Image (cartoon, helix red, strand yellow):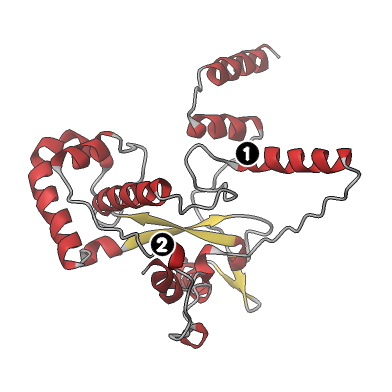
């Protein structure tokens, strides 16, 4: 009993010192809920067979992940015309990457992030940043100028993470990609530049609450409740349609996405 009280006291103190760290918050939640993350994948049952060998499990789960990615040329129509009149006077250009921009990204790298296939850690990048600024400035600007992304940065390690229900079924896992950290430096710079462009030109939908700065599902919920209460005061009904696309990110057609961005 005493040990339990001490544990809860430590958790209480940690909650008070969390500030804005979501990682610490969810770590504490996992402790309270007694969740344990399994490091290894157990047996997989597929086509009425039990697979115990790691290579077989990698092949079976990997094939399933590959099947989920949309790659259907039949759904792509070159004749589709999108309404772009509202942005006809706007044009986005890649920024010229400076050493200060790279240094800012390196300083904010998360040292807890796992390494990619090149095995270069964020700790190494942060401690050697003074020596990396000039070569990285050249490589990143060359990449944007010539439209070439280093082929080694396109390779990633993936690991299956159990999501729900039976751990013996491959469809109950989702892939986590571990990309090279050097490639993430370029990704972060482009994301920040492109996001600022969208925000400054008011191209982001005001009712899109996900993946936006200073916005979250709490804001969406607040708007929903406000509208519902407002309709109650007016004796009106509130109709809500919920849509949940399974594996939505994997089903994004890259050709259509590139055409819309272009």
Image position of 65 with respect to 17: above or below: below
The picture places residue 187, in percent across and down from the top left corner, at 30, 53
Quadrant of the image containing the N terminus: top right
SS class of the residue under badge 2?
A: helix
Say which residue label 2 marks: 87
Residue pictured at 50% horizontal, 29% vertical: 24
| Residue 239 found in image quarter | bottom right
The picture places residue 119, in percent across and down from the top left corner, at 25, 51
Image position of 1 with respect to 33: above or below: above
> Front-most of 235 and 45?
235
Residue pictured at 67% horizontal, 61% vertical: 244
The picture places residue 22, in percent across and down from the top left corner, at 51, 33
Query: Within 10 Å of the Cα at label 1, are there few (<14), some (14-19), or many (20+) other Cα atoms?
Result: some
Marks 2 and 1, how far apart in space? Answer: 27 Å
Say which residue label 1 marks: 219
The picture places residue 76, in percent across and down from the top left corner, at 48, 83
| Callout 2 touching callout 1 (CB < 8 Å) | no
**Comes first in the chain, label 2 or label 1:** 2
């Amino acid at each position: 009993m005493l040990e339990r009280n001490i544990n809860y006291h430590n958790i209480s103190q940690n909650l008070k010192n969390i500030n804005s760290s979501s990682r610490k918050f969810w770590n504490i939640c996992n402790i309270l809920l007694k969740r344990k993350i399994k490091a290894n994948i157990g047996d997989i049952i597929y086509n009425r067979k039990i697979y115990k060998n790691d290579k077989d499990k990698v092949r079976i789960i990997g094939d399933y992940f590959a099947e989920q990615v949309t790659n259907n040329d039949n759904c792509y129509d070159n004749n589709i015309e999108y309404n772009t009149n509202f942005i006809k006077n706007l044009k986005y250009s890649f920024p010229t990457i400076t050493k200060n921009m790279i240094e800012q990204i390196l300083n904010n790298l998360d040292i807890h992030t796992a390494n990619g296939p090149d095995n270069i850690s964020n700790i190494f990048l942060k401690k050697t940043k003074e020596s990396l600024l000039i070569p990285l400035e050249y490589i990143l600007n060359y990449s944007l100028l010539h439209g070439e992304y280093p082929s080694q940065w396109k390779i990633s390690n993936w690991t299956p993470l159990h999501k729900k229900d039976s751990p013996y079924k491959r469809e109950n896992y989702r892939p986590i990609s571990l990309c090279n950290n050097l490639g993430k430096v370029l990704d972060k710079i482009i994301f920040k530049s492109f996001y600022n462009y969208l925000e400054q030109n008011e191209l982001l939908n005001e009712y899109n609450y996900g993946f936006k700065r200073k916005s979250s599902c709490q804001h969406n919920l607040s708007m929903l409740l406000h509208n519902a209460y407002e309709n109650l005061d007016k004796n009106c009904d509130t109709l809500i349609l919920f849509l949940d696309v399974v594996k939505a990110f994997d089903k994004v057609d890259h050709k259509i996405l590139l055409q819309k961005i272009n």
